[in-house]
Amino acid sequence: MRKLAGIYFALCFFNASYAMDADKNKAANSTVKLPPSHVLTERLCAIGLNHFIENTELIERVAEQNLTPSSIGTIVENCLDDYREHIPRMSAMMCLYKPRIIKTILQDYPQAIEQLKKEGILS
């Protein structure tokens, strides 16, 4: 009887662990629908990034797309790399803007921002 109880509890623990892992994977793969280009442009201009959005394809790459928060972080990083290549004098300053750009793009999705914080992409 003790062995059966032990097996039962082990199976319950395994099932609960599996369910928690599935929830984590589901959250990591969930997508968000981003706003249209004019909304993103207004938001990024409001934080002083006019020059950045004029010289990168960030808006074109994310506007009205269904993307995972992690892929948004990757797209922002790629656009920052492109910007640094073309305008090297701005590189140091733009590195500091990465979290702010991502948070501005995802401001309608606080759960996505929290997910990126958990993943270490945002602080």
Image: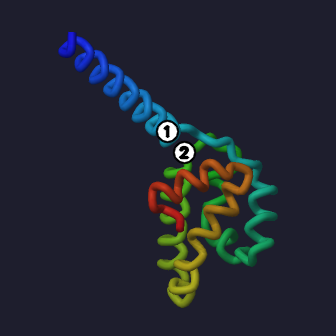
Residue drawn at 47 percent across, 78 percent down = 85
Q: Is residue 111 left or right of residue 119?
A: right
Q: How many marks?
A: 2
> Viewer-proximal residue, 117 or 100?
117
Three-letter amino acid code at the position of disc 1: Asn
Residue 120: x and y in percent read 45, 61
Outermost front residue:
1
- Asked if marks 1 and 2 touch (Cβ < 8 Å), the reply is yes
Three-letter amino acid code at the position of disc 2: Thr
Residue 15: x and y in percent read 36, 23
Residue drawn at 46 percent across, 39 percent down = 24
Which numbered disc flags the more N-terminal residue, 1 or 2? 1
Determine whether 78 is above or below 5 in the image: below
Determine whether 22 is above or below 33 in the image: above
Determine whether 76 is above or below 34 in the image: below
Residue 48: x and y in percent read 74, 78
Residue drawn at 61 percent across, 62 percent down = 102
> Viewer-proximal residue, 99 or 115?
115
Outermost bottom residue:
89
**Quadrant of residue 38 in the image?**
bottom right
**What secondary structure is marked by label 2?**
loop
Q: Is residue 82 left or right of residue 41?
A: left
Residue of label 1: 29
